[in-house]
Amino acid sequence: MTQLRIAERLGQDAFLAQTLHRDYRHVPGALSPAELGALVSFDIVNDFLAHHRLEPPRLRLARDGDTLAPHQYATAVTTRRSTVWQRVHPAELHQRLAEGASLVIDQLDHLHEPVGDLAAELESWLRAPVQVNLYASWTAAEGFGTHWDDHDVVVVQAEGAKRWRLFGPTRHMPLHRDIADPEPPPDEPVAELVMRPGDLLYLPRGWWHAVTADQDTHSLHLTCGITPPHTGARLLNWLADQLLASDTFRRDLPLHTDQATKTHLGAALSE
């Protein structure tokens, strides 16, 4: 198992006490060229594309804030067992990338052991599930526009460079299943930085950001998505599931009965 000492490089206990869920943190040059080369590279990506049957939506393309329809770079194929998979056409894939699309491969931690070790290291430290996705771009076009994520992220810049404009949150701690969307971001960013090979960036969930490979170079980076498992809402959902073991809580509420019966049931539920 490859240990990158991510906790140490992000600040260990000080990061947990002062930064986690609160603010962004940029650590230039946190990983050495040798560590990056063992973790991921464009050569490794090319090997994935050549030897693994990656298909949408695990492999996808994005441009100008939209996900490209699979038919623009793949063909649906029906197998003898009547299952359907998307066969990627290399020439059309390369054409879409040359036109400005960004390449995304989800769950790289399930495909490549060093990236799986990175995910396991973060999970052990932060005590939360981690999924690592890969993003590659060859032009200055924005793949996703200004957006926010419903999970914290740790970004590892592997090759090339990318500009990140950070606008901060407009809704505190938004979730995937929420009752409202965040307000639009402000016009001016609170920070603007260029990620170069070996740099780390931490962003709490809900932080608006825009990412552009406008440094006259290609870009390859990993995004480690940290699922929030310990929210108050999740605790209440767990508690509601546990209450299903009780006859009292599985009963229908007495909507069509007298007040005395309602009061009695209310007392029983509160015990």
Image (cartoon, grey):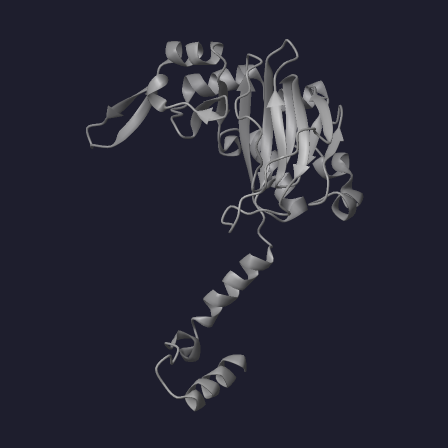
Above or below, comparing residue 231 to residue 156 in the picture: below
Query: Which residue ends up furthest to the bottom in the rendered image?
Result: 260
Q: Position of residue 175 (x, y in %)?
A: 55, 47
Q: Could you say where residue 244 lies in the image, as x and y percent from the top left?
A: 43, 71
> Which picture quadrant has residue 124?
top right
In percent of width and height, residue 127 lies at 63, 49
Is 63 situated left or right of 54 in this image?
Answer: right
Classify residue 184 by image quadrant: top right
- The residue drawn where x is 66% and y is 20% is 163
Residue closer to the observer: 202 or 49:
202
Is 67 situated above or below 251? above
The quarter of the rendered structure image containing the N terminus is: top right
Residue at point 36% right, 17% down? 72
**Is 15 in front, or is 142?**
142
Residue 72 in sight from this viewpoint? yes
Between 122 and 137, which is closer to the camera in this rendering?
137
Q: In the picture provided, is 9 more to the left or to the right than 68?
A: right
Coordinates of residue 79 in the picture (x, y in percent): 22, 27
Q: Residue at x 49, y 84 (%)?
A: 268
How many marks do you count on the picture?
0
Q: Quadrant of the C terminus?
A: bottom right
Q: Is residue 1 visible?
A: no
